[in-house]
Image (tube, rainbow, N blue to C red):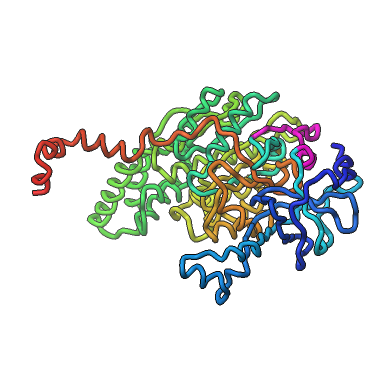
């Protein structure tokens, strides 16, 4: 990119829209807006570098406030307003103050640098043309290793916005935002657009709500997570899943370990048989009556809850499925067995990570794993869905994968509507972020504290983002500063087929009691 063009351009070609006030710092600009000019929040403007004439410095406004000294309490303005009148002369005293974040500039060598000094009072603030502004943004070419994907446009402009999928595969991405702010739409449209790239990347999506079925027409394959669920061979996990405690748990642990050590097939029938043997030979229970009592109790629990031990059928090979499908959607919405879901997610992550590490010298495997609602798989301490060994396993798998796999071309996209509930050691490993609308202070703080964008200005931007708008920053974003992007949306997540009102109307139509009541006059329906 020829950054020198923008450095040496003439400031005389730009419109002056304000001048700097006293009290500016190297990263904060406050300026008074000239009469007749309009400054918008989240728009870009220029100032001239105080020590380098002819060098543009890019700023972005985050707040605009009008002031009128005649409307201060005790002045004539409030007194006139009390009578319903307007002090017209006071309007002429009104002025507008804008506050902007100073982003930085390109130096003579084309390197991006943050501002080193504060603007001086009376320094002009300029409104750039879109053509000049576009020179601050990468046009989408990137380096030879990049795989650039257009995802939308820079807010308030027609300048295209890109992300680098290669950077995500090597460094992970964190996607956060309130419910219905556009997170899932962002991923769906990213995957849909990526289907036209050469080469086509590989995506693996953990779909907890069944929202990604629309990707089938782009080449995605949807498979229930149960096709990848491994058989349980951990005695502690078996006892936990059956729901055993105390002496009953100890008996089943001993029986399961004995079966596994002997190489016998561990089924509900073989476990019951081994449990009887352990009880009969053991010294835990003294009388025949107590032995029979505990055996019948354990037997009932195994027969009613141990069906998972008898599951047959070959599980699919996750590596082969990822290789053979442009996008693989693992559907976790088919049931509510949290323990099995955690165990399966852990198994998938471990298999992919270990395979990628084995193939590191061959350069023939890479994928991006999208983790929807990451707080269920890697919750912050204290907010776990349920205490279980499977929960601990999937959390450990997430930590190990996000810590190691990026170096082997396996990137994770961690998604959540509650960043405060996601394990911070996972968030901190993501060197790219796409943040949609967030209003919770705890969630904003999690972004501030555990990602690489530490500016307090984030709290000014995030609450005001519209649906399908996101602030992006990090290695996957071609610009060296955060940008607000209007995301292109052509495909939407699969949600409920009807609004709640329509559903209630249909429920009333199908209810016999309501049909009978609706035939009565209104004044008798409540009697």
Q: Nearer the viewer, residue 246 or 67?
A: 67
Residue 415, percent across and down? 56, 45
Q: Is residue 344 visible?
A: yes
Q: Nearer the viewer, residue 5 or 393?
A: 5
The stretch in magenta equals 131-151
Q: Nearer the viewer, residue 216 or 22?
A: 22
Q: Nearer the viewer, residue 440 or 7?
A: 7
- Please name the residue shown 64% across and 60% down the image: 449
Q: Considering the image in quadrants, where does the N terminus appear?
A: top right
Q: Would you identify the image quadrant in which residue 35 lies?
A: bottom right
Residue 318, percent across and down? 56, 31
Residue 136 lies within the magenta run:
yes
- Image: 434 above or below 491: below
Residue 372, percent across and down? 52, 42
Residue 186, percent across and down? 57, 38
- Please name the residue shown 50% across and 40% down the image: 344
| Left or right: 242 in relation to 64 | left
- Image: 445 above or below 429: below
Q: Which secondary structure is most common in the magenta stretch?
A: loop
Residue lying farthest bottom? 74
- Please name the residue shown 53% across and 56% down the image: 439
Count of marks overlaid on the render: 0
- Please name the residue shown 45% across and 51% down the image: 236
Q: Would you identify the image quadrant in which residue 99 lies?
A: bottom right
- Image: 59 above or below 221: below
| Left or right: 406 in relation to 508 | right
Residue 159 lies within the magenta run:
no
| Left or right: 516 in relation to 395 | left
Q: Is residue 225 visible?
A: no
């Amino acid at each position: 990119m020829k950054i020198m063009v923008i450095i040496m351009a003439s400031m005389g070609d730009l419109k002056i829209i304000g001048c700097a006030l006293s009290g500016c710092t190297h990263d904060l600009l406050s300026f008074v807006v000239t009469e007749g000019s309009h400054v918008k929040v989240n728009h870009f403007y220029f100032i001239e570098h105080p020590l380098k004439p002819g060098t543009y410095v890019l700023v972005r406004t985050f707040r605009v406030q009008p002031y009128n000294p005649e409307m201060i309490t005790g002045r004539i303005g409030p007194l006139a307003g009390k009578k319903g009148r307007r002090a017209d002369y006071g309007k002429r005293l009104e002025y507008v103050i804008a506050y902007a974040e100073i982003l930085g500039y390109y130096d003579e060598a084309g390197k991006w640098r943050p501002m080193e000094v504060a603007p001086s009072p009376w320094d002009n603030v300029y409104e750039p043309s879109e053509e000049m502004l576009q020179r601050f943004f990468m046009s989408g070419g990137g380096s030879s290793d990049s795989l650039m994907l257009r995802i939308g446009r820079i807010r308030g402009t027609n300048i295209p916005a890109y992300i680098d999928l290669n950077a995500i595969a090597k460094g992970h991405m964190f996607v956060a935002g309130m419910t219905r702010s556009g997170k899932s739409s962002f991923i769906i449209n990213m995957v849909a657009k990526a289907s036209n790239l050469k080469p086509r990347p590989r995506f693996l999506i953990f779909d907890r709500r069944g929202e990604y079925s629309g990707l089938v027409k782009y080449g995605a394959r949807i498979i229930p997570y149960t096709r990848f669920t491994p058989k349980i061979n951990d005695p502690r996990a078996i006892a936990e899943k059956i729901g055993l405690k105390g002496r009953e748990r100890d008996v089943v642990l001993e029986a399961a370990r004995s079966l596994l050590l002997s190489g016998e097939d561990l089924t509900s029938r073989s476990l019951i048989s081994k449990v009887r043997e352990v009880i009969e030979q053991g010294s835990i229970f003294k009388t025949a009556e107590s032995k029979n009592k505990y055996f019948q109790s354990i037997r009932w629990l195994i027969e009613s809850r141990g069906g998972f031990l008898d599951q047959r059928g070959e599980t699919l090979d996750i590596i082969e499925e990822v290789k053979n499908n442009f996008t693989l959607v693992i559907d976790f919405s088919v049931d509510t067995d949290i323990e099995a879901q955690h165990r399966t997610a852990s198994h998938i992550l471990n298999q992919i990570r270990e395979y990628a590490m084995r193939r590191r010298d061959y350069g023939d495997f890479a994928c991006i794993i999208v983790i929807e609602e990451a707080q269920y798989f890697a919750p912050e301490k204290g907010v776990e869905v349920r205490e279980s060994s499977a929960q601990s396993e999937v959390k450990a798998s997430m930590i190990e994968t996000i810590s190691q796999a990026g170096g082997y071309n396996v990137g994770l996209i961690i998604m959540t509507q509650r960043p405060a509930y996601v394990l911070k050691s996972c968030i901190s490993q993501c060197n790219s972020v796409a943040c949609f609308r967030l209003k919770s202070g705890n969630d904003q703080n999690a972004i501030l504290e555990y990602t690489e964008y530490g500016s307090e200005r984030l709290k000014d931007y995030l609450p005001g983002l519209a649906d399908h708008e996101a602030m992006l920053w990090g290695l996957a974003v071609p610009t060296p500063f955060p940008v607000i992007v209007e995301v292109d949306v052509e495909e939407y997540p699969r949600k409920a087929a009807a609004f709640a009102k329509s559903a209630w109307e249909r429920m009333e139509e199908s209810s016999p009691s309501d049909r009978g009541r609706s035939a009565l006059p209104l004044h008798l329906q409540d009697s």
